[in-house]
Image (cartoon, coloured by chain):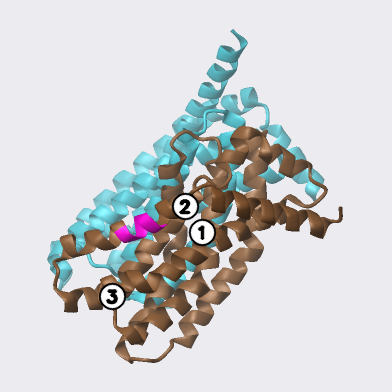
């Protein structure tokens, strides 16, 4: 089992081979992302106004997928670091590094759209509520991770140090979530995760899910492009050290 | 020398270094400078300060710990002491614990001891002093262990102080939530101790004492290669 896993990872350990694969994937992934995004936006434009919230309910279709991606990107960084450390796969570090700013921006989008939605609905831009606060903490975890990458000059050192931080942060995120929940709750509980009977009407649910898929592919597409850039940057680093 | 003797000697060396290095005075001065700034920022009204004092003291203590930690491994990194630690015939985790314990005894205990005095300046209610100290004491090990992870990750980095603050502060959220929560409960019902919240703080501290040393050791090894 492990041997097969190692074979699989060895397949793209060669950056040259990975770059060939990435070049082939690049256009399809971006196309899917943009097409699904267009479809999602079209569906959102047909959504009826909410009887309480009016047109502002449409903010949800950006806000909720962005919040999903904020968490997804962090898990992505964690698993990429895990692959890098356990399987000694060089692309893992680069993938984690490539995904970090993307995840941070999705987190920021979730916070900003949340504030824009909160102003008409709750009458305030910001409340110190459990969910808002834990997403804000997540943003700072992202920023600390990015800052650590930037602060250490030596690539190998930076890669190892940031992977340790990714592990520590990943263990900590649920604890932060739990403690902040315990601290203060005003935000509505998640209303999509109840699979049996979602609390969200189908008119809202399907556009939301399509937007979720669109954001997922957007994340993958941007991260792929950034990963190609990281590989090129790595090559440049090697060339420069040769001179 | 057996492993225990080595660790004892290491602890004694670190404690001497901490006490002689003049690290303590600036930390305590930092605590009181922050306390002094609060009335300027919030207004000198004593009843308001009394209500805010426990929470303010938690935040001040947290920042003081963070700022005192950022040189923890830096000096040893610069003079090669860190390489010597790795060559010791004891686990690096043990050597790290010896260092952190010395730091705890030499800097944190004195800072904790000044907290009632800082509280006095903020007009803290006398019956909240003991609950505050209990909560701070229960949470302090977690603050030190998590802070040491940040210090180890930032070892050898220029301007490490700010970076450590950015990395570690999000990790401190659970500790301050339960710490300040315990204090709020004690304020609401004078003279009582929020045992549940303090137990959670102790749990977080115990978990970080077991889980942080491997992370710190890995970070230091990464820093030296």
Q: What element carries label 2?
A: helix
Chain on which label 1 sits: B
Q: In this view, does B34 lie to the left or right of A20?
A: left
Mark 3 highlights which residue?
Answer: A186
Q: How far apart are marks 3 and 2 (CA)?
A: 36 Å
Residue B188 vs residue A151, the one in the foreground: B188
Look at the image and give the residue range highlighted in magenta.
B28-32
Q: Distance between the residues labelled 1 and 3?
A: 39 Å
Q: Are marks 1 and 3 in contact (CB under 8 Å)?
A: no
In the displayed structure, would residue B133 be above or below residue B209? Answer: below
Q: How crowded is mark 2: few (under 14 residues within 10 Å), some or many (20 or more)?
A: many
Q: Write down the colour of chain B.
A: brown
Q: Residue B107 carries which label?
A: 1
Residue B155 in percent (x, y) is at 55, 40
Establish whether labels 1 and 3 are both on one chain.
Answer: no
Which chain appears cyan?
A: A
Chain on which label 2 sits: B
In the displayed structure, would residue B21 be above or below residue B171? Answer: above
Write the residue at 33% across / 64% down: A133
Write the residue at 62% across / 65% down: B209
Residue A167 vs residue B114, the one in the foreground: B114
Mark 2 highlights which residue?
Answer: B68
Q: How far apart are marks 2 and 1 (CA)?
A: 8 Å
User: Is the C terminus of chain B in the top left, top right, bottom left or bottom right quadrant?
Assistant: top right
Residue B48 in percent (x, y) is at 18, 75
Q: How crowded is mark 1: few (under 14 residues within 10 Å), some or many (20 or more)?
A: many
Residue A33 in percent (x, y) is at 39, 42
Residue B61 in percent (x, y) is at 40, 63
* Nearest to N terminus: mark 2 or mark 1: 2
Q: Do the residues labelled 2 and 1 touch (CB within 8 Å)?
A: yes
Q: Verify whether residue A210 appears in magenta.
A: no
Q: Which mark is residue A129?
A: none
């Amino acid at each position: 089992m492990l041997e097969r896993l190692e074979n699989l990872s060895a397949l793209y350990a060669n950056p040259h081979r990975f770059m060939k694969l990435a070049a082939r994937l690049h256009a399809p992934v971006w196309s899917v992302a943009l097409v699904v995004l267009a479809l999602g936006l079209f569906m959102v434009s047909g959504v009826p106004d909410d009887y309480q919230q009016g047109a502002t309910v449409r903010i949800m279709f950006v806000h909720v997928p962005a919040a999903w991606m904020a968490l997804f990107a962090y898990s992505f960084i964690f698993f990429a670091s895990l692959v890098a450390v356990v399987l000694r796969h060089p692309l893992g570090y680069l993938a984690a590094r490539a995904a970090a700013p993307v995840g941070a921006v999705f987190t920021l989008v979730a916070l900003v759209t949340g504030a824009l939605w909160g102003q008409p609905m709750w009458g305030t831009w910001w409340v110190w509520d459990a969910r808002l606060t834990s997403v804000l903490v997540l943003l700072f975890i992202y920023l600390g991770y990015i800052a650590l990458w930037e602060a250490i000059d030596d690539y190998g050192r930076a890669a190892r140090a940031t992977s340790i931080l990714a592990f520590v942060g990943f263990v900590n995120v649920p604890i932060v979530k739990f403690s902040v929940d315990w601290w203060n709750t005003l935000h509505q509980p998640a209303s999509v995760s109840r699979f049996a009977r979602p609390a969200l009407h189908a008119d809202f649910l399907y556009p939301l899910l399509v937007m979720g898929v669109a954001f997922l592919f957007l994340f993958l597409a941007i991260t792929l492009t950034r990963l190609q850039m990281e590989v090129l940057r790595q090559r440049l680093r090697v060339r420069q050290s040769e001179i | 020398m057996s492993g225990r003797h080595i660790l004892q000697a290491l602890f004694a060396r670190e404690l001497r270094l901490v006490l002689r290095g003049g690290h303590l005075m600036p930390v305590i001065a930092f605590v009181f400078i922050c306390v002094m700034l609060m009335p300027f920022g919030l207004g000198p009204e004593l009843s308001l300060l009394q209500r805010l004092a426990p929470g303010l003291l938690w935040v001040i203590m947290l920042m003081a710990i963070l700022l005192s930690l950022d040189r923890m491994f830096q000096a040893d990194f610069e003079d090669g002491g860190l390489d010597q630690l790795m060559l010791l015939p004891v686990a690096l985790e043990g050597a790290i614990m010896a260092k952190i314990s010395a730091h705890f005894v030499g800097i944190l205990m004195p800072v904790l001891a000044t907290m009632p005095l800082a509280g006095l300046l903020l007009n803290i209610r006398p019956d909240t002093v003991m609950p505050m100290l209990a909560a701070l004491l229960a949470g302090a090990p977690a603050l030190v262990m998590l802070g040491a992870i940040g210090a180890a990750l930032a070892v050898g980095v220029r301007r490490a102080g700010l970076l450590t603050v950015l990395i570690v502060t999000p990790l401190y959220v659970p500790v301050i939530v339960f710490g300040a929560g315990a204090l709020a409960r004690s304020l609401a019902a004078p003279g009582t101790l929020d045992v549940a919240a303090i137990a959670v703080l102790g749990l977080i501290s115990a978990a970080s004492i077991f889980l942080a040393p491997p992370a710190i050791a890995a970070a230091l090894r990464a820093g030296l290669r």
